[in-house]
């Protein structure tokens, strides 16, 4: 089966950099996605890594190492509005990579 | 282009009643996924549908739960004889096609409370 591990909670201050790690176990791995979810809101797509390396989108970057079954989400220049839950999710061989299996989420609290 | 629309946003049911949750995917999207989320937890996959077909229902309880995505109209997640443990947020996501890198767009969810 699949399993994903990520820290349950992270706290950081405005302007800082924070890294949220995700390790996974799955068969037939296709790629790793990251989603952001504010309290009471819908998960929104942040990034996808299908190959090893770093993907950068503005203040957010995501990294994948397939050999280590490991990825991370990097948030720079933290803002108060970044306080939310962040989920890593794998696409694997089930249904040819068309499904997402989510980790338990990391609750990020940004303090002034 | 409206996003994924779910209704109702909030639903209260007494134990033993039926709950019907609706999801209209984004225009042009023919793949629909339903997820359940308990407070402070991640999203758990329930079922994956295409128009008129259930592709994967491995995450859906065998009893009381059913899902459909008819040729016309929204996808429906039906929970019969609800129990308190069914209280959760139910999210629907849609995608355009089967591509591995195709982004899935989520609706705002339906928060079901069973009293």
Image (cartoon, rainbow, N blue to C red):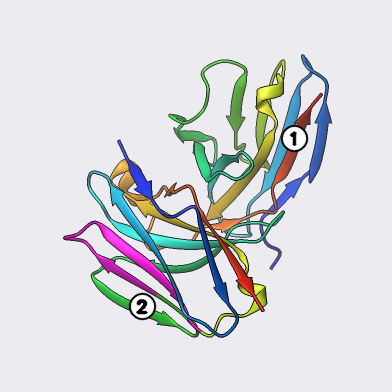
Q: Main secondary structure of the magenta part?
A: strand
Q: Which residues are magenta?
A: A62-76
Q: Quadrant of the N terminus of chain A?
A: top left
Which residue position is annotated with label 1? B112
In the structure shown, which secondary structural element does the residue marked by tag 2 occupy?
strand
Image height of A65 relative to B31, above or below: below
Which residue position is annotated with label 2? A55
Q: Is residue A27 left or right of residue B16?
A: left
Marks 1 and 2 sit apart, C-alpha to C-alpha, by: 37 Å
Front residue of B17 and A36:
A36
Front residue of A46 and B56:
A46
Q: Is residue A66 left or right of residue B28?
A: left
Image height of B94 relative to A38, above or below: above
Q: Residue at image x 36%, y 58%? A: A22
Q: Residue at image x 81%, y 41%? A: B10
Q: Position of residue B13 (x, y in %)?
A: 82, 26
Tell me if residue A25 is in the magenta stretch: no
Q: Is residue A91 left or right of residue A41?
A: left
The circle drawn on residue B99 is none
Q: Position of residue A74 (x, y in %)?
A: 42, 74
């Amino acid at each position: 089966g699949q399993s994903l591990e990520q820290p349950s909670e992270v706290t950081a201050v405005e302007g800082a950099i924070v890294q949220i790690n995700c390790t996974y176990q799955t068969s037939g791995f296709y790629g790793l996605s990251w989603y952001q979810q504010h309290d009471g809101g819908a998960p929104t797509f942040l990034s996808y890594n299908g190959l090893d390396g770093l993907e950068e989108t503005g203040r957010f970057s995501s990294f994948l190492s397939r050999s280590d079954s490991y990825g991370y989400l990097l948030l720079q220049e933290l803002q108060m509005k970044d306080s939310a839950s962040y989920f890593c999710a794998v696409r694997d061989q089930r249904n040819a990579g068309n499904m997402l299996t989510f980790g338990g989420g990391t609750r990020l609290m940004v303090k002034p | 282009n409206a996003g994924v629309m779910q209704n109702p946003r909030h639903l209260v049911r007494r134990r033993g009643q039926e709950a019907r949750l609706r999801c209209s995917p984004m225009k042009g999207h023919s793949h629909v996924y339903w997820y359940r989320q308990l407070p402070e937890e991640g999203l758990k996959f329930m079922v994956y549908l295409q128009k008129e077909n259930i592709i994967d229902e491995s995450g859906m309880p065998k009893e009381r739960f059913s899902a459909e995505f008819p040729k016309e109209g929204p996808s429906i997640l039906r929970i019969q004889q609800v129990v308190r443990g069914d209280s959760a947020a139910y999210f629907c996501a849609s995608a355009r096609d089967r591509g591995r890198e195709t982004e899935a767009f989520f609706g705002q969810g339906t928060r079901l409370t069973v009293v």
